[in-house]
Each structure stands twice: as C-alpha cells, then as structure tokens.
Image (tube, rainbow, N blue to C red):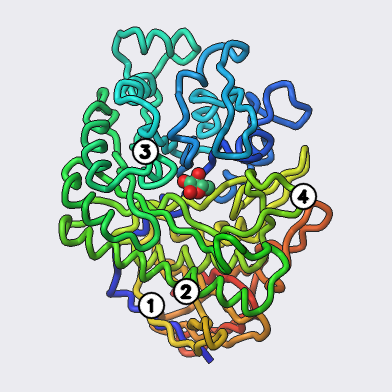
Amino acid sequence: MAKITIDREKSAGTISRYIYGHFSEHLGHCIYGGLFVGKDSKIPNENGIRKDAVEAMKAIRLPVLRWPGGCFADEYHWRDGIGPQEKRRNMVNTNWGGVTEDNSFGTHEFLELCRQVGCEPYITGNVGSGTAQEMSEWVEYLNSDGDSTVVRERRANGRQDSWGVRFWGVGNESWGCGGIMRPEYYADVYRRYQNFCRQYGEHKLYKIACGPSDVDTNWTEVLMKNAAFCMDGLSLHNYTIPGSWEHKNSATKFTEADYWETLAIAADMERKVKMHAEIMDKYDPDKRIGLIVDEWGTWFEVEPGTNPGFLYQQNTMRDAMVASIHLDLFNRCCDRVFMANIAQTVNVLQAIILTQDEKMVLTPTYYVFDLYQHHMDAKELACGIEAEKLGTEKHSLPGISASASEKDGIVTVTLSNLDPAKGQEVTIAGVKAGKAAGRILQGKMDQYNDFGSAPLKAEEFSDFEIRGGEVIIRMPACSVAEIRISD
Ligand code: AHR
C-alpha cells in the first residue's frame, strides 16, 4: 500500500509549459519522412508538412520545438536552407548516416511547422563551424523588420514580417560534437557570439548557453562563473542508456533486470538536476537562469536492419515509465527547470511518433505527454511519496513515481506504478477530494504499438474511490495515470 501526501501550501513554483517540449533534428527520418514529405507527396500534407503528425502534436499541446540539432546544428549553415528549392545547396550529413541533405526543409519550413502545430520555435545556432556574423544574420533574418539586405532577402523569399523567434541556443554540445571545446574557451566564445545576437524591436531573445552533459559539474561551474550575466538559460543533456554505450539494450527485447536498470537510471536524473541546480544557485540565487534539459530520453540499439546512423528504435511501456519518471521530476524541480525537450519527436530515439511511409503510430511515450498536459502552467504542489522499494539488488527505486499541481481549483496528480508484474493500491492524501476523474495508460513492460496493431493508449479510468476526502486508487501493473481531483 503506497501513499502520496500532497501539501497544498508548499510549492516549488509554476510548472513551465516548456517542460513538455520536444526536439527534432535532421537525423534519420525525423524531419524527412517523419514531419516533412514535400508538397508533391501522396501523404496528406499542408505545405509539405504531414497532417497526421501535426494533428498528433496539436492534441498534446506541444509547446516548443527545438531544431535543427543536435550535432547537426554545428554543421548547419542556414543560408543553405532558404530560397528556391532547386537552388538549395546539398551537403552530406556527416553526423547521421552520411546521407545527402538537400536542405529542402529549412528556416521557412521549420517555422511553418511551428505555425501549424501552434508551438514556439527554439533554434540552435552554429558555433562549431559557423561564424558570429552568420549567426547574427540568422537572427536578423528571423526577427528584424528594419530595412537591410538580409531583411529584403527574407521578403523576397516570401516572408514579409519577422517571425519573432525567442528561444535561441548558442551551439550544441560544444564540449563534444559541437567543437570539443574546454569550458573556459566555450564560455568566452559564448560571450562573443551571443553579443551579436541582437534584439530587434520587441523581439528579445532568450539566450541559451551550451551546458553540461550528465554530471559534468565543472562545465556548469565555469559557465556560470564566466557567462551567467549574459545568458537566460543553460542546457543539460542526459540520456537513459542501460547496459553500456558499446552494448546498448534492445528497445523491445529486454529482461526484468534491464527494465529496473533503465528506470533506476531515469530516476537518478533528479540527483543530476539538483547537482547542477545547486551550482547555479551559487551564481544565480534568484533563479533567473533556467535549466534547459534540451535532450533527454532513452537510447537503445537501433531496430535490426535499420541504418545505425538513423537511431530508429521502437518504444515500449518501459519508455513510458522513463517518460513519467522524468516529467514528474522536472515538475518537482520547476523552480530551476524551465524547459525540457525529449529526444526526438519522430522516428528517432524516444519518439512520440513513428511513421512508415503513409502510416503513423503513436507510442506509449506519446500518451504519457497526453496524460501530463494539465501540469502545464499549473502551480506545482509538494507531494511526499511513501512506496515500497522495488527492483533488483543492483538497481532499486520506490515503486511509485508521482507529481502534483493545481490550476483553477483542480488538483492534478500523475502517478506511475513501476511494478511490471503486480498492481498497487495508492492513497492520495492531503486533498479534500469531493470528486475525481482519471485516465490511464497500461500494458506489459515490453509491449509496444506497431503499424499493424496499436493497442496501447490513454483511456478513461475509474478504478478508484473517495473515502474521507482521500482518493484510493488501484493502479494496475506497469501503468501511468492522471487523476484530477476537485472539492
Ligand atoms: O539526439 C541525438 C544526438 O545526441 C544529438 O544530435 C546530440 O546533441 C546528442 O549527442
């Protein structure tokens, strides 16, 4: 019997909607085939963008989309992706599969995608192989309404008014694929590049510096010490990789021990977030600077027979658990975590959408985002979790993950029963429950939605009762639920 005790008087603050953000890179079939098929495709599209994918993204109110990479960002030259399609420069995508990138999806197409989805764009500029001038002019092209050659060029390409892009990344993984820089060096480079990313009119940029990977606290320390004054956000990348980098798990064929190892790695993210947040607190006690976890999620072996450079993996209920654990901990740490972007939206790593030509399937991870929607912009509520520790001798964690928030008088609790084999009774206390409504996603730990059959989805859930103002829920094995409670 587990218990979640909510304290309505204690809160870490407002849960930024951007915690529910996503990331799409020019990698495998994320952009090409997954989101963009071109105007002449037989796949239903609007201006070349898949209608089914847009509808799915709209249904979860996807708030922000990061693009064009990833490692690709530091080899991407934005001018290659504007102007008449037939004149666009071709390049080899050296990071991802060595395929030819024809640049048919560029700035205008990305911003059209964001318009259709109704989300905000987050663009990462090229520091590794680009110049400060190139980055500066991209910002001008996007955000200026002045009279200049760059703005005239945009207008000639069919866009009269500026777009007003707000979220701006200055390089990606500059400690790795973005240029193998030392933090001291990157801090100076960051200061220089961001200086030329101007504010045009009302379009003030939210500038995001490349932050650490995993537990590299030295990177955080050096960046905060030397560049905090000119950044709004600092990124953090952390993937859930059970096994080892050389011998990754299969996405679908794994043991219960693999399952627990995966979930334990996911849960350990809270420690990592707090580790970096503590350093940020030293230099930014008012928490002005957001921690931007702009790459997170599972990284498994690619599906057999697929291009290893395309990072295509299936997505099971294990991924759903990883997603709920992350979103719960981001909610709890919302005093510092301002944005998070799961990697990646379609057909790459922990995708919410998989496509095969004209077919599309929504993954269990998609339904977790669906179930968590009500947390966006709500006030986080502290919740104490008492749950039996589960797992193996090597990897154990509390068998329930949860977070809570309140908006318009309704308390939303999201909770997961991590036990892959047994149901658990969970009591939600601390709220004077009069009414409650629920939705749930449940399945076997290695179950997934495939193109022929997609049984997993979020459904109405009513296996709970209200007793003395508490909600007693019978959570099935391996399940994620949203319970909405009102007086
Ligand atoms: O998401 C795949 C890759 O992982 C990204 O391109 C890079 O930033 C990270 O290493």
**Circle 4 Cα neighbour tier, 10 Å, few/some/many (<14 / 14–19 / ≥20):** few
Q: Earlier in the sequence, mark 2 or mark 4?
A: 4
Where disc 4 sits, the SS reads loop
Residue hosting label 3: 171
Q: Earlier in the sequence, mark 1 or mark 4?
A: 4
Where disc 2 sits, the SS reads strand
**Which amino acid type corresponds to the residue marked 1 in the rendered image?**
Cys
Q: Which mark is residue 402?
A: 2
Residues at marks 3 and 4 touching, judged by CB atoms closer than 8 Å: no
Q: CA distance from mark 2 to mark 4?
A: 37 Å
Residues at marks 2 and 1 touching, judged by CB atoms closer than 8 Å: yes
Badge nearest the viewer, 1 or 4: 4
Q: CA distance from mark 1 to mark 3?
A: 37 Å
Q: Give x and y (percent) for residue 150.
A: 36, 12
Q: Is residue 393 left or right of residue 171?
A: right
Q: CA distance from mark 2 to mark 1?
A: 8 Å
Badge nearest the viewer, 3 or 2: 3
Q: CA distance from mark 1 to mark 4?
A: 45 Å
**Which amino acid type corresponds to the residue marked 3 in the rendered image?**
Gly
